[in-house]
Amino acid sequence: MTFADILTVVLALGSPVLVGKACRRWKWLDSIGPIMLLYALGLVAGLLGLKAQAQELVTTVTLPLAIPLILMGNSLKGQLKGAKDTVLAFFSCLTAAILAVVISYLVFRPSSEVVGMVAGCATGGTMNMASVKMALGVDESLFVLLNTYDMAVSFVYMMFLLVFGIRLARRFLPVKDHGTGSAASASDGTDDASLAGSSARKATVRDYAVLLGIAALCCGAGYSATLLFDPNSMMLVFILVLTALGIGLSFVRKISSKPGSYDMGMYLIYAFSFTVASMADFRNMSIGENGRMLAFFAGVVFGSLLLHMLFSKILKIDADTAVIASNAFVNAPPSVPVISSAMKNPKALTSGLTIGIVGYAIGTYLGIFLSGICG
């Protein structure tokens, strides 16, 4: 390993601990939230030149492990009470995405290939964009350009949700008492301390080791399952298996009652947040004559968010479900734990993952359909 690799790992694993301690000591930092602080630190590290192969390794390892840990750490009994909002939020997101694509197409008039790929991306993320690209036989250079725009727009979208979106949604839409399951009290911010010295969970090193081992086995099962399917479906299958195992294990009392699962999952999310922010680099993004294409992409993403919020108001969908549903569509299921953490609402994780997975499943077909309609 190079010095940059070692520094990346140290910063990724150490920054959540320092930020957690800082949030407990200074309330004004806690009001900003660990996620935003870690994103800010990551951006600074990236601008200062932190670039290493270990960044991809950290993001690849931390997020898959975090998903079953967070799900196992919350009692999911009673989650069916929120099933109605989850279903309504899904159809609201889907309708909003279709309308946003059509309206943005009428304004910016991109090619049918661009319409298809952006529509797929807006209902499941980059994986669906790649699937539509293969289905339509799109030129590689166009895909690379759109993928760059996807990273830029999605990052701005994520920052908007973290800084303004969640708070605005909670003022505009109903707010439900979400509780925290078996996790520490999210309402007072104690869950944000994660592994940074919090004694609320009283977990031992053995507890953490056992839970991490279970999460690793879940990831192994998820990866093994992907080998049975088409390579283009690997991420979908992987997330499906991780989610199913995490939910299933949450009903196993000996596992769900073991302290430390949620804390460890959040610690990994914080490490992921710092690292993924440090990888952001839009300095070389060329807009040139393709500004209209970028505008179309942004119009679809933010237009779908606006329409979805309006529909959510009409349908009386609660704020957290509405926000995490939109994020699941735009940034795909792997980003859901980040938003769930920022909302301090671990129970929203299940709804977000469910909506995102269904978006994965239909996004490619929707992209191909809209490409034909707008061609």
Image: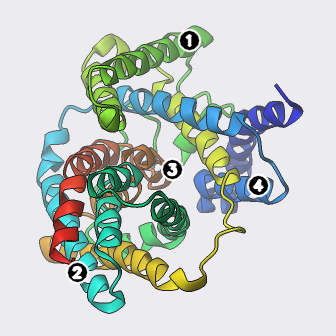
Q: CA distance from mark 2 to mark 3?
A: 43 Å
Q: Is the residue 35 above or below the residue 171 in the image?
A: above
Front label number (4 vs 2): 2
Q: Residue at x 59, y 52 (%)?
A: 35
Q: Amino acid at mark 2?
A: Val
Q: Quadrant of residue 87?
A: bottom left
Instruction: Measuring from the top left, give residue 264's x and y in whole percent.
Output: 54, 28
Q: Which residue is mark 2?
A: 102
Q: Which sits earlier in the primary sequence, circle 4 or circle 3?
A: 4
Q: Amino acid at mark 4?
A: Gly
Residue furthest right as drawn: 3
Report crowding for label 3: few under 14, some 14 to 19, many 20 or more residues within 10 A (C-alpha): few
Q: Residue at x 11, y 53 (%)?
A: 84
Q: Secondary structure at mark 1?
A: helix
Q: Which sits earlier in the primary sequence, circle 1 or circle 2?
A: 2
Q: Amino acid at mark 3?
A: Asp
Q: CA distance from mark 4 to mark 2?
A: 36 Å
Q: CA distance from mark 1 to mark 2?
A: 50 Å
Q: Which residue is mark 1?
A: 209
Front label number (1 vs 4): 4
Q: Quadrant of the N terminus?
A: top right
Q: Which sits earlier in the primary sequence, circle 2 or circle 3?
A: 2
Q: Which residue is mark 4?
A: 46
Q: Which sits earlier in the primary sequence, circle 1 or circle 4?
A: 4
Q: Which sits earlier in the primary sequence, circle 1 or circle 3?
A: 3
Q: Which residue is mark 3?
A: 188
Instruction: Measuring from the top left, give residue 169's x and y in whole percent.
Output: 36, 72
